[in-house]
Image: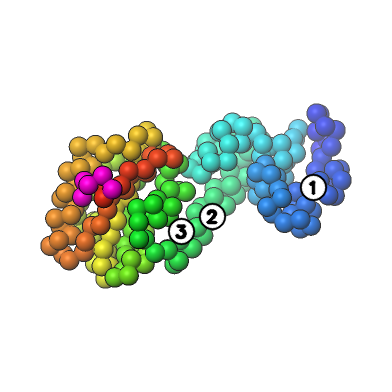
Amino acid sequence: MEDPKTGFTIKELPKEERPREKLLKKGSKYLSNSELLALIIRTGGKKKTAVELAQDILNNFGGLKSIVDLSCEELKAVKGIGTAKASQIAAAVELAKRISALKNENHNKINSPIKAVELLSPEMRFLKQEVLKTVLLDVKNNVIAVPEISRGGLSSSIVHPREVFREAIRRSSAALILVHNHPSGDPKPSADDLNITKRLVKTGEIVGIKVVDHIIIAGENYLSFKEENLI
């Protein structure tokens, strides 16, 4: 289908300008965000090419980082994006998250708060609700796993020591780091954050798994309880 603005479909563009051909010839790093997204959704709509539809998605939600936590229903709000295209985008995003998590879990040693931030910030700084995770460490501070503990905010009714330490005990962890996000962008700990941390530190002393830090990720900012002498 011919595009009303440019007069071209992707197939009518010169081969060197088509996303797939450009990727094969030059490599994926030479493609724009809209071109990479176009390869995921594969086809355009009645009036727009796949690249233009991809650009519409990026424009509607404020750029690439915005699609990390979008639901299929939110993606389908963009004209030209149906269930199939929304599912393809959601699957690609989730796969990227899992690959990143797997790489980080297997190759990271946490010897400072910033290392934990680097491990989890790429995913957690974009989340729209509070999520608590634990970074489980062995005796040499190597990452064993990063299980998710809860969603929906930190409170005594949601975060129970049993849930926090269950996976740590199962995996014979020597220590753990608590990490959660503040969607507001303000890393200052709340009263619940402080109280729950104290409770979990005491539990850790009892079960023999040290809570070495609690890190709050808030957008581009973070706060380490250890650095602030709060733990």
The amino acid type of the residue labelled 3 equals Ala
77 or 227: nearer the viewer: 227
Which type of secondary structure does the marked residue at label 2 adopt? helix
Query: Within 10 Å of the Cα at label 3, are there few (<14), some (14-19), or many (20+) other Cα atoms?
Result: some
Q: CA distance from mark 1 to mark 3?
A: 31 Å
Residue 37 falls in which quadrant of the image?
Answer: top right
Residue 16, x across and y down, in percent? 83, 49
Asked whether residue 132 appears in the rendered view, the answer is no
Q: In which quadrant of the rendered view does residue 52 lie?
A: top right
Coordinates of residue 76 in the picture (x, y in percent): 57, 37
Q: Residue at the location (26% across, 50% down)?
A: 226
Please state which of residues 193 and 129 is positioned toward the viewer in this rendering. Answer: 193
Q: Is residue 181 above or below residue 4?
A: below
In-image side of 119 versus 209 (left or right): right
The residue sitting at 85% across, 33% down in the picture is 7
Q: Identify the image quadrant of the N terminus.
A: top right
At numbered mark 1, what does the secondary structure look like: helix, strand or loop? loop
- Circle 1 residues within 10 Å: few <14, some 14–19, many ≥20: some
The magenta-colored residue range is: 227-231
Q: Characterize the local packing of mark 2: few (<14), some (14-19) or many (20 or more) Cα atoms within 10 angstroms.
A: few
Tell me where residue 174 sits by quadrant: bottom left
Alpha-carbon distance for marks 1 and 2?
Answer: 23 Å
The reply to whether residue 210 is in sight is yes
Q: Which residue is mark 2?
A: 96
**Which residue is under mark 1?**
18
Tell me the residue at 33%/58% (across/down): 135
Name the residue carrying label 3: 101
User: Residue 156: which disc?
Assistant: none
| Residues at discs 1 and 3 in contact (Cβ within 8 Å) | no
Q: Residue at x 87, y 45 (%)?
A: 14
